[in-house]
Image (cartoon, rainbow, N blue to C red):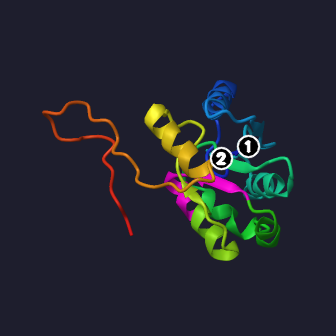
Amino acid sequence: IGLIAPSGNASGQEEIRIAKENMEKYGFKVEIGKHIDAQKGYLAGTDEERAADVNDMFSRAEIRGIATFLGGYGCCRILPFLDYNLIRSHPKVLVGYSDITSFLLAIHQKTGLVTFHGSSGLTKVGDYARKHFRQTIMSSTRIGEVAKPPKASEETADRNNRLMTIV
């Protein structure tokens, strides 16, 4: 899986190692994008550099999926620099969330590729999230019903991890 930073940059090499280790917990071999530790202001390099990492990961046959390092404003700025024909002809699993949504929607709209709103490299996830990620993205079986996240206590209302269906 390729790990890219299409928006915000890492605050240091330790964050990149943490994101890589988080993705390895899913069982992935992780390739880091060339510009993941670049910096232009709060972004991971110039718009062109960040787009180049996206295009590079889509072009590489050995990369079967792409995860984003983290969200953050700036992702929409790379959209004009993406090679949508390349992306369309080399479909891969693409996962991210937060401000990455503009990126996911643009890829879907321009290529028809199904994208996934889910864990980024720096997302702390537990067994529940890993199980459903694997079930959805790493399996060829039907997803079926998604189990509700574990509750902290039966006596209290859910404050975190509420499951909502959006159509």
SS for dot 1: loop
* Residue that sits furthest to the left in the current view: 155
Q: Residue at x 67, y 52 (%)?
A: 6
Q: Disc 2, disc 1: CB below 8 Å?
A: yes
Q: Which residues are magenta?
A: 92-102
Q: Which residue is mark 2?
A: 67
Say which amino acid is labelled 2: Ala
The dot on residue 1 is 1
Dividing the picture into quarters, in which one does residue 100 lie? bottom right
Q: Residue at x 67, y 55 (%)?
A: 93
Say which amino acid is labelled 1: Ile
Distance CA(mark 2)–CA(mark 1): 7 Å
Q: Residue at x 67, y 32 (%)?
A: 20
Which of the two residues, 153 or 66, is positioned nearer the viewer here? 153
SS for dot 2: strand
Residue 46, visible in the rendered structure: yes
- Please give the count of numbered marks on the rendered protein: 2
